Amino acid sequence: MSYQHNIGTRRYQFEDLRTLLARASPLRSGDQLAGVAASDAQERVAAQMCLADLPLSRFLNEAIIPYEADEVTRLILDRHDAAAFARVRHLTVGDFRNWLLGDAADAATLESLAPGLTPEMVAAVSKLCRVQDLVLIARKCKVITRFRGTLGQAGRLATRLQPNHPTDDLSGIAASLLDGLLHGSGDAVIGINPATDNVAQVVRLLHMLDDVITGYQIPTQSCVLTHVTNTLQALDRGAPVDLVFQSIGGTQATNASFGINLALLAQARQAALELNRGALFADGVRGSHVMYFETGQGSALSASAHHGCDQQTIEARAYAVARAFHPLLVNTVVGFIGPEYLYNGKQIIRAGLEDHFCGKLLGVPMGCDVCYTNHAEADSDDMDALLTLLCAAGCNFIMGVPGADDIMLNYQSTSFHDALAMRQIMGLRAAPEFEAWLQRMEVFEPGNQSRLVNHFPPALIDACARLENQ
């Protein structure tokens, strides 16, 4: 079905819903590279105005990637909750934006609505939103998950402690790990990207992290960010796996390029659940969110798997994949792929806020790696702006990297100090169980949720000596 809109005497024609979404998307280099972007600002506005008048129900009747050809499309449509959608079924995309900005769209209402929304719906409304809209609406959404701690509560900001090392040297990893803990980082996960991605090394790193977490009774979880098949092999070897990691995309072909499919993710999740490593909480429920997914705009185009769609809509479809497996964490690594997809700071800021917005509306526990590569037209000031906006928007977690400079992956992210600054500026706190541990270990001052003690915590002196001797 084609769509059209007039501006003055000029008529703009969009051949199908996929094209309309692409032309309405705010400018980014990846869509230009793919040849799907609007030709100019006027065409973009025409597409946005046309999109605003489109009924939300249209997205259930016109798939942007054919149902028969793509298992992600089948997942989206087969699991759509018509009863949840009934609340907004009568709205157009523009009306939906207005409703989301209103007081009726509170946290409880948005939580119940999430199963009734498709990725294409939330991608569409995001294209009509200003930056402040993306912040305000996402801030209303609360997605709470649990493994050994509770993540996503209002007024909380968690961090992934990322102690990567270019040679996987255990003493180097340990030094970064201790540095992060001493700055209150690590409540979301202690997660290592292995430089040597083989099963034996994965098992070695998992045992090292487990020794630290269990030895000091840290209410957090570990993850080695290796391919899901490596994690399954590590499980077969008896490794202490907390979270299963995998990069995912919004099309079947993108996931095939990663060497995965939905059945494999289901197998890995079940294997992790059978370990029962999550904490038993006071309400008698064991923490069972065992998956950690990473995404990023542009991955589908890199794999020639975008089906002529814009990169932001495909990214939103990845969150439907994530939602199906009830993850603890989902992380958009927003500026990591490079300027071919997000050229400069302005594009990275917009993309990060869109990703967070779309994930939260779909009921996904969204975090963001506020990052850029050194050949992008971006700098730390841009990242500070995005970080502040995301924290205002209620982002579940960010990265904690020593000095904000990952010396293994060679990109710029956020530091332990950045998380402390955001907690102090915004009045945010660590996850409750982790916060209590930090105070017991005398990392934070008693009664203060984000102020470091002014001396080396005695309880961690022994930890420092042990880690250095590993």
Image (cartoon, helix red, strand yellow):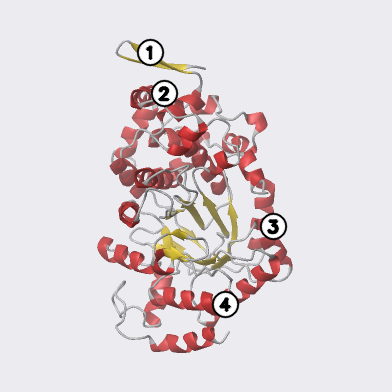
Instruction: Nearest to the eye among marks 1 and 2: give it.
Output: 1
Circle 3 — which element? helix
Residue nearest the viewer, comparing 60 with 126: 126
Residue carrying label 3: 229
In the depicted structure, whether residue 173 falls above or below residue 283: below
Residue that badge 1 annotates: 11
Q: Residue at 31% across / 77% down in the picture?
A: 452
Q: CA distance from mark 2 to mark 3?
A: 42 Å
Q: Which residue is mark 2?
A: 54
Residue drawn at point x = 31 percent, y = 71 percent: 450
- Residue in the image at 51% along x and 27% along y: 18
Tell me the CA gap for discs 1 and 4.
63 Å
Q: Which mark is residue 170?
A: 4
Could you tell me which residue is drawn at 31 percent across and 51 percent down? Answer: 389
Q: Earlier in the sequence, mark 4 or mark 2?
A: 2
Labels 2 and 3: the sequence-earlier one: 2
Q: Residue furthest front?
A: 375
* Camera-side mark, 4 or 3: 4
